């Protein structure tokens, strides 16, 4: 008893029109459209929507990014073809409902009591018996029993050659067919709600009222009226950023070819932004304490907006979308990376820019410093990856001591819940960081990410981390500058400045040679001094032409290139060890010289001093490769938070809610409610007026074991039959 599309037919003489109507009202056509919508939704979920074109070019390349943009795959849910498919789906499903609803209503009203008695013997579930009562009495008894069991019953009297017979027709579970109407109506309502809350109304306004997307820059207040939507706009969804202590009454609606400015009937003032973090550094709570200023009445209404707890005012929902920097002020210290650069301080605001010269200091437009982000909290994982069972595993580590292994704990750590891990996490907040870009005159930019405080990674001396990357898709590479005994960078910077001074290098070489060689052997001391002076000159990059073309002129790489060109291959390993030992010793003496000039106590040989000098040698070498003339260290800041709100007027929301309720009702009815019909034919027997011949049959829309048991129960209850007959 399945539902077909044989309902209302279109009355037209045109075969083409009739064929189009049949196709549009076909359930196959609606399912095909729904399949296309599902595929498009998957694409919209996998492919990030409304990203800048540069992001798609970096990820997919120029060709495919243009293909995605041309096919509107970067804005699937507002694409014209997606909205057209939704419109066709609404039309098709509505026609399906229109064609089948009259037939379903008719089917709900009828009991099909006119079925022939002979037809009951063809049913799968049937039973026969002789009852010791008249047909009329049996009909009323059976009817009352069925009504008591929740069935709807209709009795029909028929004349037969043996006398008056009775047909008892009953039905139950008719809501199954109502579920069909509810489920298909839900699809229509959800699609209509989506169209109402989508870009369809906004595009219609743009078409009918002459509005156009804005593609320029500047202040929002300067945007002309042809790019603005009125406060009475019936439906919109946009974003608005409000910094602490400020207010705004205009939202931004992103369009494929620009933006539209939506004027709100009120202004949002952010009094305080609240954010709480988990131990992992992930935000746990976003909350905004706001004031809503009515533009018509001047009334001020306080409200609190949290994630999943929006505020509502004058028909507009205010959601907490995210948070951002509201224009924090920062103070940076320029760290010179070459001799031409001089140290200086500069103040800036996140989101702003400053003009610099490559020689250092605010000047011409050779370089543009763009302040991009300030992060006050940076939680990093410093776990060692040790086995929680107590093993000392790890690449290159010692073998595991079986006496210290707890087999049960080891197995339990690797099995069970998916959130278990065999690596230990040590989460630590390493303090604030600053992100900025240096853009040259040609427009090319590099991105930098520098930490304010020294970070102790457990692998040596605590170091200041200066990150850099060429492309947004690349990972940051870090220059590690070791912190001195005062926790600052002055020790390293003075050492680097002294390395560039030939006189100080010679003094450090003299001290090193005097300590390393017996004073009674002046010839050996002169040879050692010459070797040390050559190594320091190469390391400092003071020997032109020592490095091949395209190679660094200083650092450890310059020494390696010199040895490759001048030392036989068989002697390079031993000569390299000697040179590195000499280099470390001379740099240590150079550090002592700088401390004497700064009137500081000399360095005392220790593990801490050794760690500092080891990292200093590596940092001095890596600084030769730093791609900018200066690095900027964050010295002070004043954070200003900002909330990003999503404001929406969504009249289709309630329509969608109604559609969801109908969808739940319809699916539940169709899946869990079985439509059943029972017929009992009661006819008088020949020669015995007090006896009745009874034939019973049951029909159901799904064959289940519950149906078999229900029929056996009804046959026993109504006819007293212990064992029923089943047809083919």
Image (cartoon, rainbow, N blue to C red):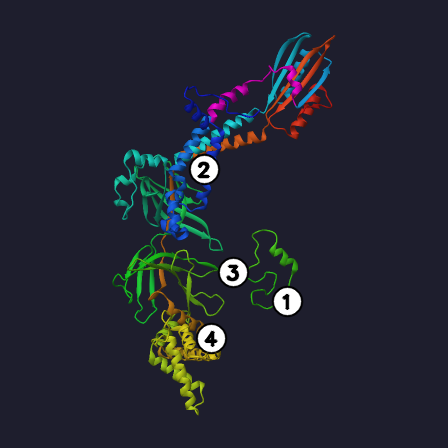
Q: Which mark is residue 401?
A: 1
Provide the major secondary structure of the magenta segment.
helix
Q: Earlier in the sequence, mark 3 or mark 1?
A: 1
Q: How crowded is the residue under tag 2: few (<14 C-alpha within 10 Å), some, or many (20+)?
A: some
Range shown magenta: 96-123
Q: Secondary structure at mark 3?
A: loop
Residue 316 seen anywhere in this rendered image of the structure: no
Q: Residues within 10 Å of mark 3 (few under 14, many from 20)?
A: few
Identify residue for label 4: 610
Please, what secondary structure does the residue beneath circle 4 have?
A: helix
Residue 544 or residue 139, whichever sits in front: 544
Tag nearer the camera, 2 or 1: 2
Disc 4 versus disc 2: nearer the observer: 2
The nearer-to-camera label among 2 and 3 is: 2
Label 4: few (<14), some (14–19) or many (≥20) C-alpha neighbours in 10 Å: some
Disc 2 on helix, strand or loop?
helix
Q: Alpha carbon of mark 3 to alpha carbon of mark 4: how far? A: 26 Å
- Identify the mark at residue 575; answer none if there is no mark: none
**Callout 1 secondary element:** loop
Q: Which mark is residue 426?
A: 3
Q: Looking at the image, is mark 3 or mark 4 earlier in the sequence?
A: 3
Q: Residue at x 43, y 66 (%)?
A: 454
- On the image, numbered disc 2 is attached to which residue? 37
- In the image, which is nearer the foreground, mark 3 or mark 1? 1
């Amino acid at each position: 008893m399945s539902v077909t599309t044989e309902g209302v037919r279109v009355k037209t003489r045109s075969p083409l029109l009739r064929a189009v109507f049949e196709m549009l009202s076909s359930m196959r056509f609606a399912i095909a459209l729904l399949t296309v919508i599902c595929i498009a939704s998957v694409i919209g979920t996998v492919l990030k929507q409304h990203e800048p074109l540069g992001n798609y070019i970096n990820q997919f390349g120029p060709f495919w990014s243009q293909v995605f943009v041309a096919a509107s795959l970067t804005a699937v849910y507002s694409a014209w073809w997606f909205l057209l498919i939704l419109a066709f789906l609404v039309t098709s499903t509505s026609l399906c409902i229109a064609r089948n609803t009259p037939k379903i209503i008719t089917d709900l009203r009828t009991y099909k009591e006119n079925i022939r008695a002979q037809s009951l013997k063809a049913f799968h579930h049937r039973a026969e018996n002789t009852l010791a009562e008249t047909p009329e009495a049996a009909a009323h008894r059976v009817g009352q029993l069925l009504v008591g069991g929740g069935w709807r019953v209709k009795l029909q009297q028929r004349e037969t050659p043996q006398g008056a017979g009775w047909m008892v027709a009953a039905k139950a579970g008719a809501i199954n067919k109502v579920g069909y109407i509810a489920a298909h109506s839900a699809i229509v309502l959800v699609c209509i709600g989506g169209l109402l809350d989508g870009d369809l109304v906004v595009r219609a306004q743009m078409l009918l009222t002459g509005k156009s997307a804005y593609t320029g820059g500047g202040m929002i207040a300067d945007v002309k009226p042809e790019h603005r939507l009125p406060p009475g706009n019936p439906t919109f969804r946009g974003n608005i950023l409000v910094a602490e202590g400020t207010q705004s009454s205009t939202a931004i609606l992103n369009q494929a070819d620009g933006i539209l400015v939506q004027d709100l009937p009120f202004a949002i003032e952010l009094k305080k932004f609240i954010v709480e973090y988990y131990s992992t550094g992930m935000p746990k709570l976003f909350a905004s304490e706001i004031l809503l200023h009515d533009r018509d009445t001047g009334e001020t209404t306080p409200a609190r907006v949290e994630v999943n707890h929006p505020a509502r005012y004058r028909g507009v929902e205010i959601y907490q979308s995210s948070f951002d920097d509201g224009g924090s002020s920062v103070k940076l210290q320029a760290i010179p990376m070459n001799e031409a650069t001089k140290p200086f301080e500069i103040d800036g605001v996140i989101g702003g820019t400053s003009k610099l010269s490559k020689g250092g200091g605010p000047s011409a437009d050779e370089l543009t410093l763009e302040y991009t982000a300030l992060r006050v909290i940076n939680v990093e994982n410093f776990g060692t990856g040790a086995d929680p069972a107590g093993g000392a595993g790890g690449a290159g580590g010692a073998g595991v001591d079986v006496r210290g292994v707890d087999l049960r704990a080891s197995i339990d750590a690797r099995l069970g819940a998916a959130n278990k891990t065999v690596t230990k996490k040590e989460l630590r907040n390493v303090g604030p960081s600053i992100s900025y870009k240096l853009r040259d005159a040609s427009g090319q930019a590099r991105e930098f990410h520098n930490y304010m405080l020294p970070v102790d990674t457990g692998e040596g001396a605590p170091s200041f981390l200066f990150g850099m990357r060429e492309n947004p898709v690349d990972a940051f590479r870090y220059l590690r500058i070791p912190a001195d005994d005062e926790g600052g960078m002055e020790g390293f910077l003075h050492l680097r400045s002294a390395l560039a001074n030939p006189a100080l290098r010679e003094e450090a070489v003299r001290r090193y040679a005097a300590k390393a060689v017996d004073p009674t052997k002046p010839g050996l001391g002169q040879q050692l001094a010459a070797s040390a002076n050559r190594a320091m000159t190469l390391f400092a990059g003071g020997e032109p032409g020592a490095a091949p073309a395209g190679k660094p002129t200083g650092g450890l790489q310059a020494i390696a290139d010199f040895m490759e060109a001048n030392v036989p291959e068989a002697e390079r390993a031993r000569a390299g060890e000697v040179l590195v030992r000499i280099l470390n010793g001379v740099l240590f003496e150079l550090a002592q010289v700088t401390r004497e000039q700064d009137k500081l106590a000399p360095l005392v040989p220790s593990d801490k001093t050794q760690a500092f000098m080891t990292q200093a040698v590596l940092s001095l070498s890596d600084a030769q490769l730093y791609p900018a003339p200066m690095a900027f260290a964050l010295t002070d800041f004043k954070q200003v938070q900002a909330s990003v709100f999503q404001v929406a007027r969504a009249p289709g929301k309630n329509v969608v809610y109604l559609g969801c309720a109908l969808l739940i009702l319809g699916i539940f009815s169709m899946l869990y409610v079985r439509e059943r019909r029972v017929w009992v034919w009661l006819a008088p027997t020949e020669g015995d007026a007090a006896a009745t011949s009874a034939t019973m049959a049951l029909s159901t829309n799904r064959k289940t074991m519950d149906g078999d048991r229900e029929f056996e129960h009804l046959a026993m209850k109504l006819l007293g039959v212990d064992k029923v007959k089943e047809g083919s």
